[in-house]
Image (spheres, helix red, strand yellow):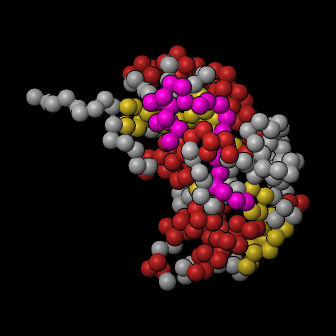
Amino acid sequence: MVEDAPYEVRDILITGGAGQVGLELARADWPADVRLHMPTRDQLDLTDADAVRVAFAATPFRAVINSGAYTAVDKAETEVAAAFAANAMGPAILAEVTRAAGIPLIQVSTDYVFDGSGEQDYAESDPVGPLGVYGASKLAGEVAVTTGNPRSVVMRTAWVLSPHRANFLKTMLRLAADRPALRVVADQEGCPTSARDIAEALKTIALRMIDDAGAPTGVYHFVNAGSTTWAGLAAEIMALSAARGGPSATVEGIPTADYPTPARRPSNSRLDTFKITRDYGIAPRPWKDAVAEIVAELIPETTR
């Protein structure tokens, strides 16, 4: 005879489980009554409405965190359909199905919805104006989510870093192992942000929305505190790595014009996080602390 479970299981669907944020969501310390479902893209195609409905019919999900996305910013300029399918159609289907199920949807978005021309940290209410296809597709996803499910949160973030997958921090360490000097863009400013911290913020929001039908909804910003340029971030990475006996190189700041890319990047990606602290009690730690934690994980003390 099998005894009844001491608690009701709360099933949460997480998409994009193989990405930086998804991997950290899997590693997060969830309550014992939470059961995560993290299907691969092959197991659940978010652009297939029928497949999504079948998945929801099979499992009584209590919330959905959509951290999956098409993130190839430059390739999106020529792969417009693929970018919009993943970043707009998928969220639209999730919004429709979660609304029908009466459950919250938390959508991860990006600083690329802004054109970067503002001089202040961007608030959630500031006008949007994406410079390229990627930002436009993510903005379309935001609109689909916020209009498709009134119990939804869109959480914009930026400059995501982690010990996993490909990201700027890991690229800098890899290049420093082979080059004495690195030329890095110095006229784009933003907020380096730990994927682990993003996952913790998403966890906090999801659990609150499950337990409280009146939990705040809408658009929020989450990034680590403070800001720097790409060159400033690279210099900090090099200093942290050198201190641990890892690869290091000198960093030369260059203008964006010297590093042309197919997609234009916003020159100002700084996001204001007052609202998420006010409504959800989430207070971001300084970006330097977050970066130091990642470098320490990638370069253990034993390498000294």
Residue at image point 60% right, 75% down: 240
Which residues make up the magenta segment? 204-227
Residue farthest toward the left in the current orientation of the protein: 1
Residue at image point 61% right, 45% down: 277
Looking at the picture, how far across and down is residue 260, in whole percent? 85, 57
Q: Is residue 72 left or right of residue 186?
A: left
**Is residue 193 inside the magenta stretch?**
no
Looking at the picture, how far across and down is residue 221, in whole percent? 67, 43
Judge whether residue 18 can be spotted in this image: no
Looking at the picture, how far across and down is residue 235, in whole percent? 71, 73
Quadrant of the drawing holding the N terminus: top left
Where 253 sits versus 6, above or below? below
> Is 254 in front, or is 12?
12
Numbered circles on residues, count: 0
Where 284 sits versus 294, above or below? above
Q: Is residue 126 left or right of residue 236?
A: right
> Is 65 in front, or is 218?
218
> Is 246 in front, or is 287?
287
**Is residue 213 inside the magenta stretch?**
yes
Where 210 sits versus 227, above or below? above
Judge whether residue 289 can be spotted in this image: yes
Q: Is residue 20 left or right of residue 27?
A: right
Residue farthest toward the front in the current orientation of the protein: 278
